[in-house]
Amino acid sequence: MPEIRESWGIENETPEQFADMVYGVKFKFTSGSPGYIGDIYILQGDVLTGDAPFVLMRMNGTLTLAD
């Protein structure tokens, strides 16, 4: 995703190289009220800068940044 590449300054890094500079977690999320059900991913850099982590959701088979 362009926003993630830009945030980490990624150009030609492999997924393995990117994994060395980020922490990630995947949740199988189910909302307590009618709403979203599906995969949610949270990506946080290996340096705490005060910036919020990226939150991504899989909707209709497409991975998108959460609002």
Image (spheres, helix red, strand yellow):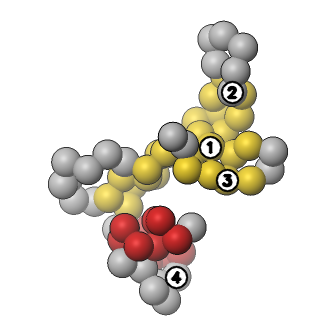
Q: Amino acid at mark 1?
A: Met
At which x and y percent is residue 25? 49, 45
Q: Which mark is on residue 36?
A: 2
Asked if one can make out residue 19 in the rendered structure from this viewpoint, the answer is yes
Relative image position of residue 64 (x, y in whole percent): 63, 52
Q: Quadrant of the N terminus?
A: bottom right
| Circle 4 crowding by C-alpha within 10 Å: few under 14, some 14–19, many from 20 | few
Give the quarter of the image for residue 37. top right
Q: Of helix, strand and loop, which one carries label 1?
A: strand
- In the picture shown, does residue 19 fall above or below 63? below
Between the residue at mark 3 and the residue at mark 2, the CA separation in whole angstroms equals 13 Å
Which label was assigned to residue 14? 4
In percent of the image, x 64 and y 19: which residue is there?
Answer: 31
Q: Secondary structure at mark 3?
A: strand
Q: Looking at the image, which is closer to me, 3 or 17? A: 3
Where is 17 relative to 22, above or below?
below
Q: Amino acid at mark 2?
A: Tyr
Residue tagged 1: 57
Disc 3 marks which residue?
A: 63
Between disc 2 and disc 4, the foreground one is 2
What's the residue at 36%, 78% (across, down)?
A: 9
Contact between labelled residues 1 and 3, with CB atoms less than 8 Å apart: yes
In the image, residue 38 above or below residue 30: below
